[in-house]
Image: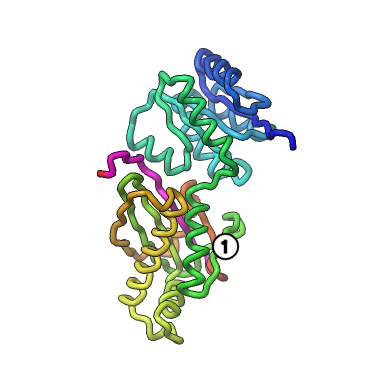
C-alpha cells in the first residue's frame, strides 16, 4: 500500500518564517505532498476551501485575520473542524494560550523555534494515526458510561442536526488536575436529567425525583464519565486528581446561545439534545 502523503498549510505574514518552515519540512522524513502558504487567516480559509489539507501551522499575530480567529472559524466549520493545528508565535499570554488549547490546538511552539521541535510535533500528529479531539474522547466516555448507568445511548450529530433545547437545563462541570489539567462540562435538559436520575436510582416515575436526587445523580454520572475520559485521553498511568462536580441551573435561552460557541459541541442522548465542552489547560510535569 502506498504511503499516505500530507498537504500542509503554513500561515504567517513573515516570508522569513515560512521559508524556514519550508526548509525544515523539506529536510524531514515526513511524507509530505504539497506545502501551501498564506499571509493571514483570510487567505488561509480560502486555501482550505479549495484544497485538502492535513495540517495547519499558523502564527497568531497577523493582519486582516489573526491566527486565533482562524482557529475559531475552523472549529465552527464542519469541513475544517477536525484539521489539526499547530501554533507558532511569540505570544506569551496564558489566557490566550489556554483559549487556543480549548479549541484543540495540537501543539504550541514559541518563536524562535528549533527544527527538531517542529519535526517532533508534526511526527506526533501525522504519524500516529487518526487524531481524536478531546470532545470525541468525552463522547466515547459517555457512550461507555451512560448506557451502563442509565440505559441511554449518547451519539454525536453535526450541530445543525441537533434540535434546540425546549426547556431549562442543568450544567455540570468537573475539573481535573495533576500531570494534566482541564475541565469537562455537560449541559442537559432538566427532563433528561430527571430520567437519568430515575434510572440510576431504580425508580419508575420521575415525579418521585427531588432536586437533591437530580444533583446527586448528575454528580455521580460526571465523576464516572471523567474517570473514563482521563483514561482514554491520557492513559491509565496519568497522575490526576478530580474536583467535586459543580451543578448549576441554566435557562433555555442561554443554552441555545452557548451552542454557537466554537468550543461547545451538540450531541444527542436518546431523543434529547445535549451540549458538551472540554477545556484543556497546561501540562504539569511536576504533578503539583
Which one is in front, 117 or 264?
117
Q: Is the magenta stretch mostly helix, strand or loop?
A: strand
37 shown above or below 45: above
* Position of residue 220 in the picture relative to residue 81 (left or right): left
Depth check: give the residue in front, 188 or 10: 10
Residue located at (47% from left, 66% from top): 145
Q: Element type at marker 1?
A: strand
Q: 167 or 85: which is nearer to us?
A: 85
Residue at (34% x, 37% y) in the render: 95
Q: Would you say residue 279 sits in the magenta stretch?
A: yes
Location of the N terminus by quadrant is top right
Give above or below for 78 relative to 93.
below
Farthest right residue in view: 1
Crowding at dot 1, Cα within 10 Å, few <14 / some 14-19 / many 20+, comes out as some
- Residue 255, quarter of the rendered image: bottom left
The picture places residue 154, in percent across and down from the top left corner, at: 54, 65
Segment tinted magenta in the rendering: 273-287
Hey, which quadrant is residue 7 in on the image? Answer: top right
Q: Describe residue 154's horizontal placement relative to residue 79 as left or right.
A: left
User: Foreground: 82 or 242?
Assistant: 242
Give the tally of numbered discs: 1
Which color scheme does this rendered protein use?
rainbow
Which residue carries the number 1 mark?
155
Q: Where is residue 63 in the image (x, y as percent from the top left)?
A: 49, 23
Residue 276 higher or lower than 6, as above or below: below
Q: Is residue 174 magenta?
A: no
Q: In which quarter of the image is the C terminus?
A: top left
Q: Where is residue 224 in the image (x, y as percent from the top left)?
A: 39, 64
What residue do we see at 38% from left, 27% from top? Answer: 91
Q: Among all residues in the image, which is located at the extreme top? A: 16
Q: In which quarter of the image is residue 245?
A: bottom left
Amino acid at each position: 500500500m502506498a504511503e499516505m502523503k500530507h498537504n500542509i498549510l503554513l500561515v504567517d505574514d513573515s516570508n522569513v518564517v515560512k521559508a524556514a518552515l519550508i526548509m525544515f519540512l523539506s529536510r524531514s522524513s515526513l511524507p509530505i505532498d504539497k506545502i501551501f502558504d498564506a499571509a493571514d487567516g483570510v487567505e488561509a480559509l480560502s486555501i482550505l476551501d479549495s484544497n485538502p489539507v492535513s495540517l495547519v501551522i499558523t502564527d497568531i499575530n497577523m493582519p486582516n485575520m489573526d491566527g486565533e480567529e482562524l482557529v475559531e472559524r475552523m472549529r465552527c466549520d464542519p469541513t475544517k473542524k477536525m484539521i489539526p493545528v499547530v501554533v507558532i508565535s511569540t505570544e506569551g499570554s496564558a489566557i490566550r494560550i489556554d483559549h487556543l488549547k480549548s479549541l484543540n490546538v495540537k501543539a504550541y511552539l514559541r518563536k524562535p523555534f528549533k527544527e527538531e521541535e517542529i519535526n517532533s510535533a508534526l511526527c506526533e500528529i501525522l504519524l500516529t494515526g487518526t487524531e481524536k479531539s478531546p470532545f470525541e474522547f468525552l463522547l466515547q466516555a459517555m457512550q461507555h458510561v451512560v448506557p451502563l448507568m442509565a440505559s441511554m445511548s449518547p451519539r454525536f450529530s453535526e450541530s445543525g442536526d441537533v434540535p434546540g433545547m425546549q426547556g431549562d437545563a442543568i450544567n455540570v462541570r468537573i475539573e481535573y488536575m495533576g500531570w494534566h489539567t482541564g475541565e469537562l462540562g455537560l449541559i442537559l435538559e432538566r427532563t433528561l436529567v430527571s430520567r437519568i436520575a430515575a434510572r440510576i436510582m431504580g425508580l419508575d416515575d420521575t415525579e418521585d425525583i427531588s432536586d437533591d436526587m437530580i444533583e446527586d445523580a448528575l454528580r455521580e454520572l460526571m465523576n464516572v464519565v471523567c474517570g473514563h475520559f482521563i483514561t482514554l485521553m491520557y492513559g491509565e498511568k496519568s497522575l490526576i486528581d478530580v474536583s467535586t462536580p459543580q451543578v448549576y441551573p441554566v435557562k433555555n435561552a442561554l443554552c441555545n446561545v452557548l451552542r454557537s460557541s466554537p468550543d461547545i459541541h451538540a450531541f444527542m442522548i436518546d431523543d434529547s439534545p445535549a451540549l458538551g465542552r472540554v477545556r484543556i489547560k497546561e501540562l504539569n510535569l511536576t504533578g503539583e
